[in-house]
Image (tube, rainbow, N blue to C red):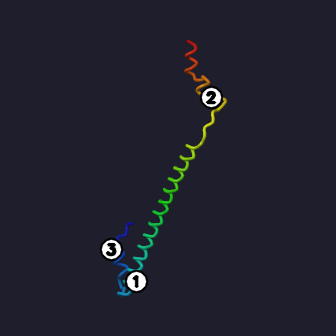
Amino acid sequence: MTTDIDDLIREGSTGLSPDGLGALEAAVWQRVNRHHARATAGRLQAGALVIALMVGTVGGGVMVRDEPHADAELHVLTVEAGLSPFGLTGDVG
């Protein structure tokens, strides 16, 4: 903002009666309260997102641990197949 707040107050308060200044103050406080409500809503949304992320992470971790691991019958591309390049050089020479 390039406008000075004091200039805005001086421009807005010229020619206002005390009742007009009261209305100006009420409008300012209404805007401040609206800003606080938006900030609170943003914090609540961020908190809900963090909780959802934590629940998903913990739930996913629990589900992975309880998954039974079955032994695969086909060992073509595993270490047990002996197809690594370093295993082949050991046989050559």
Tag in front: 2 or 1: 2
Q: Quadrant of residue 27?
A: bottom left
Taking 16 as reference, is 29 above or below it?
above
Quick check: marks 2 and 3 in contact, CB under 8 Å? no
User: Which amino acid, by three-letter code, is at mark 1?
Assistant: Ala
Q: Earlier in the sequence, mark 3 or mark 1?
A: 3
Q: Which residue is mark 3?
A: 6
Residue 40: x and y in percent read 45, 66
Marks 3/1 in contact by CB < 8 Å: the verdict is no
Which tag, 2 or 3, sits closer to the chain's start? 3
**Which amino acid, mark 3?**
Asp
- 55 vs 73, left or right, is left
Return the x and y of residue 85 as percentages of the image width and height: 57, 22
| Mark 3 nearby-residue class (10 Å; few <14, some 14–19, many ≥20) | few
Residue identifier under label 2:
77
Disc 2 element = loop
Q: Which residue is mark 1?
A: 23
Tag 2: Cα neighbours inside 10 Å, few (<14), some, or many (≥20)?
few
